[in-house]
Image (cartoon, grey):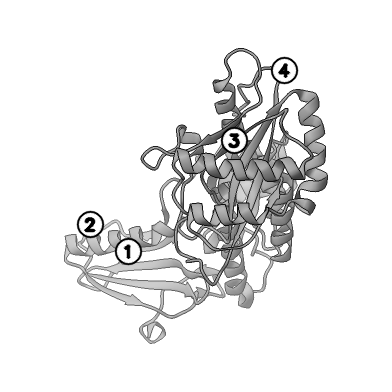
Amino acid sequence: MAKTSLLSNELRHYPGLLVIELDPHHADPTGVPPAPLSVGAASALAGHLAKDLDHILGGIDHLGLILPGALYDQTEILQPGLPLPIALADVYAGSLQGGFVPQLIALGADRGLLPMAEINPQRRPGSGPLLLLPFCFVGTPDDISRLARRMEDDLLQNGEVSPATREAVQQAFGLSALNLSFATLGDLCALLRVQLEGNGLLPLWDLLEHAWFERPGVRPVTLESGNRLLVTGDHAHTLFYTFDDWAQFGPGRALPAAELGVGYQRWVWQQRQYTSALAAYGLEVRWVLANPQLEEILATADGETAKAAMREIPCLSGDYLIEAMFQNDREAPEHQMMVTCHADPELGTLAYTVMTQDAAGELLRLEHHYPLQAEGLKVIIDRLVQRCAEQGTERQVLHPGRLLYSESGRNLRAATGAEGH
């Protein structure tokens, strides 16, 4: 659901950013962003930023300005509906006693936490190389309209911070910056678009932009590798294919048998790239297991029809999926378990094929275990180890170093002893 500002009808808000490009020679790529500043330190820093903005924008004394003494990565700023600037505007609205009064408000931390949960930075490991300090102007509709035009036209081009502000930022947060400049959310979006396009991920931009700015309707995307995704509101819907489904009725059905392994790996790579990015930017990703009937519908459906068809199917839950291929009716204990790890040097584990036999060597079960999330790999392994321990099952794990499949059956298969070493 879209969140709207609590500002009165006579007031509007417009956000901006202080963009901090970290010096890679002095930044830990696995580290967490600095902790939020105290109230006193945040107020001191806010004074520096307000002075720079006043100079760059030709005077801001008639406007309210609010900012947190905290740093965020871009996935925290670019969320569906852009809620962080709205939260800042709400704090400003709560400070008003009667009519509008232009003032500078700096939000500092008490015991490491800012006054509203919505604006507390997540401080995830590996954030960067850009860290962002958001701020929000508040004023009358006419003043904010004029300000917005000037910010979009001039802020990035003329928005370099003063030496005093640069020094204040680095000292306050204890970091070394390669570059500091002011920018708008539009500038940040444009930068990300260029980055995604340069990495062949422009359709991801279309999906994210649809969610950030709450575009109406459904935005569907089908990639060349056959991945299907659609975004509506703050939800993303996507299909998951096991290898067998992908090769037999899914996007790989028209490929020659010899190309199925490479094709499925390409599909998995794209799926992981897109779903992890959508989740990182605040969308709830809903996975649906593909089936032939759904595949036929989606081949010609528009966005709304595709969404309706995907919502009729219960979404996949948990971190992994078990595809049961064979189960013997006999209730004999599992005496031997052979696990084939289908893996790629770049993608890691794609699936596990699990084959169990009884004491007489008769096949009991044949299953394929697929991780849906990174955490699913550990869960699969832990459950298989526990299953063997409970039944006293001997376990052998084979690592062929590639994805094994039958070209004639177009299906995943277990490794032979010679293939697993």
Q: Earlier in the sequence, mark 4 or mark 2?
A: 4
The residue carrying mark 1 is 381
Q: Which mark is residue 233?
A: none
Does residue 210 appear left or right of residue 40 in this picture? Answer: right
| Residue 259 image point, x, y percent | 63, 75
Residue at the spot 46% in from the left edge and 47% down from the top edge: 122
Q: Which mark is residue 331?
A: 2
Q: Earlier in the sequence, mark 2 or mark 3?
A: 3
Residue at the spot 75% in from the left edge and 44% down from the top edge: 55
Distance from Cα at disc 4 to Cα at disc 1: 59 Å
- Badge 1 marks a residue whose secondary structure is helix
Q: Earlier in the sequence, mark 4 or mark 1?
A: 4
Tell me if label 2 and label 1 are in contact, CB under 8 Å.
Answer: no
- Quarter placement of the C terminus: bottom left
Instruction: Say which amino acid is labelled 4.
Output: Glu
Instruction: Say which amino acid is labelled 2.
Output: Glu
Marks 4, 2: nearer the viewer? 4
Distance from Cα at disc 4 to Cα at disc 2: 73 Å
Residue 298 shows in this picture: no
Crowding at mark 2 (Cα within 10 Å: few <14, some 14-19, many 20+): few
Q: From the viewer's perspective, is residue 22 above or below residue 260?
A: above
Distance from Cα at disc 2 to Cα at disc 1: 23 Å
| Residue 350 image point, x, y percent | 48, 67
Marks 2, 3: nearer the viewer? 3
Marks 3, 4: nearer the viewer? 4
